[in-house]
Image (tube, rainbow, N blue to C red):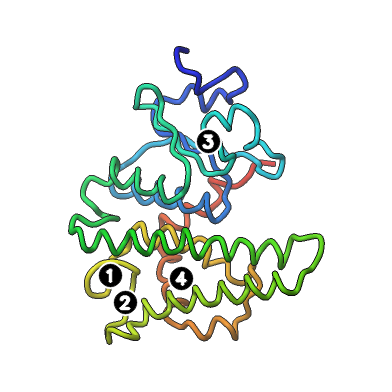
Amino acid sequence: MSHSLYIDETPAAVKNSKGLHLITQSTPNGQKVQIFLEELKDVYGLDWETTVINIGTNEQKKEWFLRLNPNGRIPTLIDNTQSPPFPIMETSAILLYLEKFADKNDQFGFSDPVERSEALQWLFFWHGSGAPYQGQANHFGRMAPEKLPYAINRFHNETLRVYGVLEIRLSGKYTGEPREYLAGKGKGKYSVADIGTWPWIKGWSFSGFSQEEMNEFPHLLKWIDRIAARDAVKRGIGEKYALKK
C-alpha cells in the first residue's frame, strides 16, 4: 500500500474494507456512532462494516489502531471511499462527518443556520460538560481502587448539575414551551444533538444516581424514554455490537 495508515497487524476486516468502517465497543461513546449509523441505514440505506474490539485488553493502544487514531480511543470511523482512506476520531466529529456526507436531506441535522447552531451548541455542551463529568462519576464511584469522597461527590454533583441544564432546556422553563428534543424550532427535532447525548444519560443508574435524584428531571426522563423507543436506537445498543466472547 502506498499510504501508511494500515500495516500488517491491522485486522484484515479493517484494511480490506472498501467503504465506511467503524471500530467500536458498545460503550456510551461507541453507541453514539452506532446509533447514528443505524438511523442513516433506516433513512438512506447506508452500508458500513464494523469491527468490535475489547478496550479492556488495550487493543486500542496498539500501533495499528494508533495509526488511525493517535488518541487511542474508540470509536474510530474510517472512510475508505476517500483516497487515501480518511480516519475520523472523536464522537462529535464523527457524527458531524456523517451528517455532512451521509445525511443529504438533513434528516438529523438542520439547513437553517440558527437551528444548526442550536444543535452544535447542545452537542458540544454534552461533549465538553456532560460526558467528562459522568465518566469521572463512573470512574470514582465504581472503578477507582480507592474511594475518594471528594472526587465521588464532586463528579456526582456536577453531573446532576448538567442534568439540570438539560432539564431547563427540555422543560421550557424560561421559554414557556416544553421541548421533545434539544435543538430545532418549536418542540425541536431529533438530531445529532440528541444522538450525541442520550447514550450517556440513559445509564444514569449505572453511574450511581438514584430514582429520587432523577425525579427532579421529569422532562429529561421522558426524553430518555422517547429516544429509547426508536428502532434504530435499539439496534445501535443491541447484540449486533456486543463483544464476542
Q: What is the residue that sits farthest to the left in this orientation?
A: 112
Mark 2: which amino acid?
Arg
Q: Compared to 151, does 17 lie above or below?
A: above
Q: Nearer the viewer, residue 28 or 228?
A: 28
Mark 2 or mark 3: which comes first in sequence? 3
Residue drawn at x 35%, y 86% is 173
Residue designated by label 1: 188
CB atoms of marks 1 and 4 within 8 Å = no
Mark 1: which amino acid?
Gly
CB atoms of marks 1 and 2 within 8 Å = yes
Residue 179's disc is: 2
Mark 3: which amino acid?
Asn
In the rendering, at what x and y percent does residue 62 appear? 65, 31
Secondary structure state at the residue bearing disc 3: loop
Residue designated by label 3: 69
Gap between marks 1 and 2 measured at Cα: 6 Å
User: Does residue 141 appear left or right of residue 67 in this picture?
Assistant: right
Residue drawn at x 58%, y 32% is 66
- The picture quadrant where one finds residue 220 is bottom left
